[in-house]
Each structure stands twice: as structure tokens, then as C-alpha cells.
Image: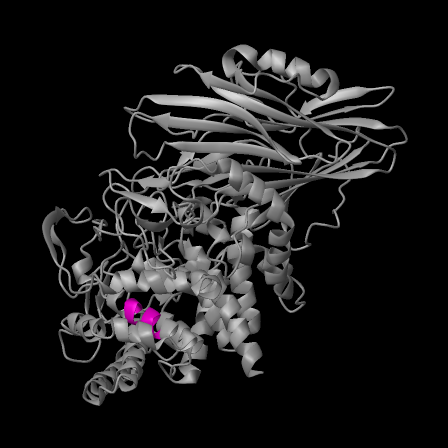
Amino acid sequence: MTEQRHHSSIPLAAWQRPLGLDYPNAAIAAHDHGPIIDDGVFHGLPIGGMGSGAIGRNFRGDWSRWHLEVGKHVHRSVWPNQWSVFWQTASQQAAQVLCTTQPDTDELSSWNWNYPVGAGNYHALFPRAWFDYQHPDWPLELVQEQFSPVLAGNLKESSFPVGVFTWRVTNRGSETVRLGLMLTWEHTRAVEAAGLSLQRQHSAWNDGNTSGVTLTQTSDQALSSHNGTWALAVQAPESASVSQWTCWDVAQDAAALWQDFASDGQLADYPTSQKVAADQRSATAIAVTLELAPGASAVIPFSLAWDFPIVEFADQSRWYKRYTRFWGTNGDQAQALAVASLTNADAWRTAIEAWQNPILADDQRPFWYKSALFNELYYLVDGGTLWVDRAVGGPEPAADDVGLFSYLECYDYPFYGTLDVSFYSSWSILALWPELERGEILAFSKTVNDADDTVVTIVATQVPAIRKAAGALPHDLGAPKEQPLIKTNAYDFQDINNWKDLNLKYILRIYRDVSLWNDQAMLEATWDTIPTALEYVHQFDSDGDGLLDHSGADQTYDTWAMSGAASYSASLLICALEAAIRLAQRMGDHAQADAWSEWLAAARQSFETKLWNGTYFRYHTADTDLREVIMADQLVGQWYAGAIGLPAVAPREMIRSALQTVYRFNVMQYANGALGAVNGMHPDGTVDTSSNQASEVWSGTTYAIAAMMLQEGLDLEGWQTAWGAYNATYNELGLWFRTPEAWGIERTFRASMYMRPQSIWAIEHALAVRAKNA
């Protein structure tokens, strides 16, 4: 590897890895409950807006993660999609694909692959990434910045299906350099268009100082997610020239294309418009060529845009994506999007910096935390994200309507808006796009009184159950295999009608959002569902002690059984009752508030007398081997109480003692604090192995516990706990940009690309509250 520099344009908090450097010691997928996605370590930040579909380019340089078909995961390298460079001085020249590997077939074998591993660095700080090329034999400084305009507080550009790629090139040598940069792109969405007859065309264009190529795809189905356009565009410096091969055949023309570019860094222009045969793998290429005197620099911005306006699901329900509110629904605006991206790139970059710089400049926040805080947001783009404007054929929404928004729990468990998990993850959306959080809660509120008597077979028990009972909150807002946003509760691993946490988490999210944003309209829209939700779970207090009684894995830990009252649901219940009482008082329903106050008093007394053991809160009350297990998440209700200003769920000395116990055992006696908080540990220091989930570390739970520790003034404990989750993800286990739900000391993981780690934004909320109260 070469001696590394850190380019001044790249924030110090950006995550960094040498280009193309493998990590053979990465964790591997656990297969306890069927196959789990494991795509290896080569990943990077995606481009694309929220809900527009996404494409991921990894730190080798190839484009390998394809989430353009919303809700579907495709991992394969589309090898023609590459950046390449040519340079020439009076004495030497070279042409190189800027990718540290090569295709595993003879495809494109004539191209010069295998850029040296480690000759430069990849940096990432969502939504921006940088490829800093530092080839030891080149007289060039080459840095490419890539980003999409996912901007805090922005409900327009954050949806745009675009990527901006700004090259900053400098001649560090003593001779004039002729430089060529080429982008090649195959006309594919990397997903099969089953049953469709596709027609494709490539067209070159020039729009003032911007040049590009548009790739058009239509089918024999008028309303298909496969109909739309791509556009590649570049704004060349005044002294530069732009050239393109508008259309080339991947199988037939690759060698000729490379020979053309490698000869002088320029392309011999092909026809400006060309139709593509049905069985042809077509691609396009666009190049910029210029000369740089010694010490001279140039900035060369490219853009990539796509306009595939329809989201389509397995049952053929169709929606228009959010960005179509601003660009129309015809699918012919990729060129205009690409041009707009180049026009607005500087303003978007400035907006990103204005959002992030106050956090990046704060010396009290560790660098690793700043890196994880922003980079975990990748999943809001990459998570099968739905952000739709309206149903195809549906009425035009109101002018101020922000659309419907949700994203997948993960691709292994593909459920939208999973309620027990988004209770943790929703802090990021709440902080950055609160209108979208509001919309998801309102969507859940409309399901409370619904019943679906469809009989399903519960996977874990093989017992039949109805899909959803009236009064029970659904696990999710649906799945891609059905009608998400319409047909809810696609989850069938356990019977959610018996779950103890969903209704309580729903109430707490309402209270949090209403109180933090003073949103009386939201309270009025959801109020009638709150008594219903509480009355439904009250039936589970079988012994009248005020606490809910468990009968299995009937909460978010859906393989870790509880029996009798449990600290997890008890702390949630106390916090939810405190919230509901205040909402009732705000609505003027004092009789309801008084009734809940009586329930609350009984719950508080039982929590302390039945679950407190003098040091921490027991796992559950049943007389089993698990009774005294130290559950990392035992005070989940206190986390919310402290975050949103509700009374503590127990005396402060009990809370601190319990958290310090969790820190001593679940954090520091597990991998010496280097992997986060293991979910369950016996008081003798052995990990609870009664279930796979008991013996796992959950990334999102760890961040939530860290936030609670910081709220309670346990700073050393909080930062160490959070660092363990960061270290496992971005260092030790090689899980960057696919942060899973769970991992273990045996170096396995489960459920990559997961929703819950967004809870790191609860730490940011805790820090903001402390700063406000200081």
C-alpha cells in the first residue's frame, strides 16, 4: 500500500477503508432459522433518494447492490458500469478501470482491470462518499465525491432518483498531462422483467454546457415499474471536450471501446440515437478529455439519474413514487433530473454541510460516533424504502400532502414499518423528517380497530390463528409480497394478537411525537385508538397485579420466551400509562386519566415488589432458570421516559443500579465491551443460551441502552456501550453498510441491512436534551 493522505475536502469523521482491501475475518451469517443474506464485506453508500430506489457502489469500485425494484434485494456486480481514467505525458501514458477487481468471466477481458488494492482510500459520511485515488506511479491527484441530495428537513429533493459525482483532479507532476475520464453504463435495472417485452433506445444530447446520453425503456404493459429512463450527464470545463459511444454491445464492442479510450482518452462519437435489439445487452459510454498543466486543477461534475415512476408489488398494486409529485409520472424526465442535479449540486452540498457541521464540529462527540450517526442513515435509502405520492389511478393528493413513507425491517424479514422495531429506529426520521414519522403513526392508527379473520398458521408453533384481532396493533404495515400500506400484518412467525409490547409502543410513539412537536392535531386524530389499545392489553393481566403476564415469546424478542410478568413489558407499561394519562388530561378526559392512574399505581407497586431483586430487575416472575437473568433491555420503558420527560418508571437508585449491572455484565463481561451489550446474561457471568436471541447482541438495542445511560448521567458507561456496537459494525466484524439486527462473539450475524440500528439517533436526542437543560 502507498503512504496515505487525507484530502482536505473530506471530513475527518468519515469512515475510511483502503480501496479494495478485503476483510477475511468478517462475521458470517448464522442460519438458525433459514437462509440469511450474506453478501460479503464489499459495500458502500448508496445513491438515490428515499423511496426512489437505490444503487450501491462498493469500495472496490463496482456497482453491486441493486435496490431499484423497491422491496427487492439484488446483489451482483454489473461489470460494464465503471469509471475509467486515461492519462498521458510526453514520456508515458496509462488507461485504467478504477476498480480493484475484475469480472469472474471473460466479459470485458480486454479492459485494464485490477487497480492496485490499497492505492487510496474510500471514505463515507452519509449521504456523501469519496474515492481518493493515490496510485504511486501516477502524476495525478484524483478524488471523486459522490452523493444524492438526502437533506435533513427537505421533503422534496430528498426523494430525487439522482447521484452526483464530482471529480477534483490535479496534476502533481512536472509535465503537462492529457486526462480522460470515462463513465460506462449498461442499460439494465439488474432485475428480471418477467413476462414483459421490452423496447430500448439510446439517445445523445447537449443542453448548453451539459452533455449526456438518455437510455429509454418501455414495455408492452403501459403501467409497469420497468418503464422509464436513465440519463448520464457531464458539465465539462471550458477547455475540455465531451465524447460518447451512445450505444455499444457488451458482448461485441467492449474491446473496441476500450481500445478507443485507451489510445487518447477520448471516444469516437457513435450515432446520436440508436434502437436496441430485444436480445442485445446494450450500454453507453461518455468521456471528458482535457489537458492539465503542471500544478493545474479541474473540477468535473457528472450525474446519473433515473425516472422509473411506478412502485409495483406482487399482487400488482401500483403506486407513484414521491418524486413524481415534482417531475410527473411519464417516466421521461431522467435527462431533466440529471441536468438539475448538476445545476444544484453545489447548493445541495452546502445544505448537507450546514446540517452536519454543527455535529461534526462538536469536540464532545467522539469521531466514531459522528461517523456511525450519519452512516447508519444509509438504510433510509437502501431499506426497500417506500415513499409514495399516490396510488396509480388514485386521486391527486392535497398540495401539502407529504405522501406515505415506510421502509423494511430488513430483506430477510421483509415487513414495512415493523412496529416493535421502529419503536427503536424511528428516532432518526423523527429528528430529520418528522412529517414522515407522523404519517407512519397515522397509518398505524387506522389499523387499531380493524380485524382480519383470515386464518394463518403460526410458523413457530404450527397453531392456527387469525391474522389480526380488533384492538391489537399489527406487527407491520404489510410486505412486498402482498399489498403494503393496505394489507397489514404480514408477519406470521408468532401470533401478534398475544403480543404485549406493540400496543404500548404505539402509545409511546404518539406521546413522544405529540409532546416533542406540540402536535395537537395528531393527538386528536389518534386519541380514540389509545383507550382501545390499552384495554386490549389489559386482558393479559391475568392475576390482577397491574402487570401484563407473558405466555411465550410474545414481544419483539420473538424466540426468547417470557412467563408471568417481565421487566421488559412492565417498564413499557408504566411508561405508556404515564403517557396515556397525560394525553387524556390534554384531551379533557379526566375520568379516563383517573382510571389509568389506578392501574398505574398497581403496576408500579408490582414492578418493584415482584421484579426488583435488590440489584436489577428480574427477567420475569416465573420460577424458572431464567428468572434472575440480567436482560440488557430490562428498562426499555425508562429509556422513553427519560427521553420524553415522563416520570421515571422506578426510583432513581434502582434505575442506576440496574444500568450499572447491565454495564458490568452484559457489556464488559462480553468480549470485554468490544461488541456491545449481549441480550441476556446469568448473574454468574455466563451468557443465557436459552434462545438464539438471548445470546445475541442487538445493535439497535445497544444504542438505545447507551442513550438511556447518557440520559441517566452514566457517561462512561454509555459511550463504551455505544462504541461496542460501532466497533462490531465498522471494525471488528466487517458489517459496514449492512448493519445487522444481531451478532455474537462466535463471529456470526443475523438479519443484515436492518432497521433497528437507526436508534443511534436516540443518543443524539439525549445529547440535545442535556445541552438544552444545561
Q: How many marks?
A: 0
Name the one closer to the observer, 556 or 62: 62
Q: Position of residue 120 (x, y in %)?
A: 70, 37
Q: Is residue 39 left or right of residue 110?
A: left
Most extreme residue toward the front is 208
Is residue 559 visible to us here?
A: yes
Q: Quadrant of the C terminus?
A: bottom right
Colour pattern: one colour
Residue 574 appears left or right of 105: left
Res 663 seen here: no
For the point 74% across and 47% down, which residue is it? 6
In-image side of 427 versus 348 (left or right): left
**Residue 542: % across, % down:** 13, 73
* Residue for point 20% across, 53% down: 494
Q: Quadrant of residue 699?
A: bottom left
Query: In which quadrant will I find the N terminus?
Result: top right
**Above or below — where is 527 with respect to 397?**
below
Name the quadrant containing residue 524: bottom left
The magenta-colored residue range is: 505-511
Decide if residue 383 is on the left or right side of residue 413.
right
Comparing 205 with 31, the one in front is 205
Q: Could you tell me which residue is drawn at 23 percent across and 66 percent down?
A: 500
- Look at the picture and state if 698 lies above or below 572: above
Q: Is residue 761 magenta?
A: no
- Percent across and percent down for residue 676 are 49, 58
Q: Main secondary structure of the magenta part?
A: helix
Q: Quadrant of residue 240?
A: top right
Nearer-the-camera pick, 302 or 671: 302
Horizontal and vertical percent position of residue 155: 46, 57
Residue farthest right in this picture: 174
